[in-house]
Image (cartoon, rainbow, N blue to C red):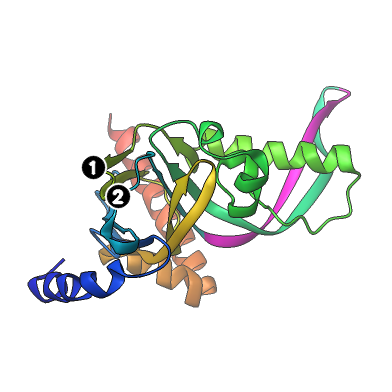
Amino acid sequence: MNRLGILLFLALVPMLMGQARPRLVPAVDQEQIEIIYSFTGAELMVYGAILYPNGRVPDEPVDIVVVLKGPEQSILVREKQQRMGIWMNVAQARFRSAPAFYALASARPIDEIVDERTAAIYELGIDSLQLSPASANPPEEAQRFDEGLVDLRGRGGLYVEQLDAVEVTEGVLYNARIDIPARVPVGEYTAETFLIQNGRVLAGEVRDIRITKSGFERFVATAAAEHGFLYGLAAVLVSLLLGWLAGILFRRI
């Protein structure tokens, strides 16, 4: 936060202190994360302050939960089974909307903070994600595909719950750290911060995050998206050239 932002924040504090409900004033240490050729992951810090009515900090402790998710994607999931010694697709399900990445940061397990109903309303936790299936699969099969998609992305490090990742200082200041894996998809993300007390969500705020590619990676991604035929042709030519050079080297050894 720059000096002007700090001054504006301090100027607003007296006005916000007189509100009827608690309010969050969140910020992020970087609104845009750039992926370059040497990108091995990053850490996003979400921090801020909790403003209480009349500036009075409650006696009962509060929890801060941060959810980073996005971009939303339409995805087709296929199920393979072995039939007569051959692996083949036997069923499939399409999801109209599912986050490509989901990370929850909290100080303790989410089931110790809210009940199942509240978790489902605010999508707090991987098990509470609303995946919006678009296929008319039977209920048991639909649940199997839901669990399969979550498991697949969980094993890929794209759906995670990070405990001990949030600190609340004197019930007023907080910070949360979320690990961004190296294979995170590019796109638009949202960082949602929730203030929770006694199982109730008292306040919530959202900040937008953008993850983009830069340098050569951005050039390749843009070429693949906007000039698919030429990109494919170039990839084939490069492969042929490398194969030819490899053949020459092996003949000389």
Label 1 packing within 10 angstroms: few (<14), some (14-19), many (20+) = few
Check if residue 74 falls in the magenta segment.
yes
Above or below, comparing residue 137 to residue 148 in the picture = below
The span shown in magenta is 71-84
Residue located at (62% from left, 38% from top): 115
Task: Give the main secondary structure of the magenta stretch.
Answer: strand
* Image position, residue 25 (x, y; %): 31, 63
* Image position, residue 243 (x, y; %): 41, 46
Question: Which quarter shows the N terminus?
Answer: bottom left
Question: Which quarter shows the C terminus?
Answer: top left
Q: CA distance from mark 2 to mark 1?
A: 9 Å
- Residue toward you, 235 or 84: 84
Residue located at (72% from left, 42% from top): 146
User: Within the image, what quadrant is residue 6 found in?
Assistant: bottom left
- Disc tally is 2
User: Within the image, what quadrant is residue 178 found in?
Assistant: top left
Q: Amino acid at mark 1?
A: Glu
- Residue that badge 1 annotates: 170
- Residue toward you, 241 or 153: 153
- Residue toward you, 83 or 57: 57
- Residue toward you, 206 or 148: 206
Indicate which disc residue 213 carries.
none
Check if residue 4 falls in the magenta segment.
no
Q: Residue furthest left?
A: 3
Question: Can you see residue 39?
Answer: no
SS of the residue at dot 2?
loop
Above or below, comparing residue 132 to residue 64 in the picture = below
> Label 1 near label 2: C-beta < 8 Å?
yes
Indicate which disc residue 57 carries.
2
Q: Is residue 98 left or right of residue 105?
A: right
Q: Amino acid at mark 2?
A: Val
SS of the residue at dot 1?
loop
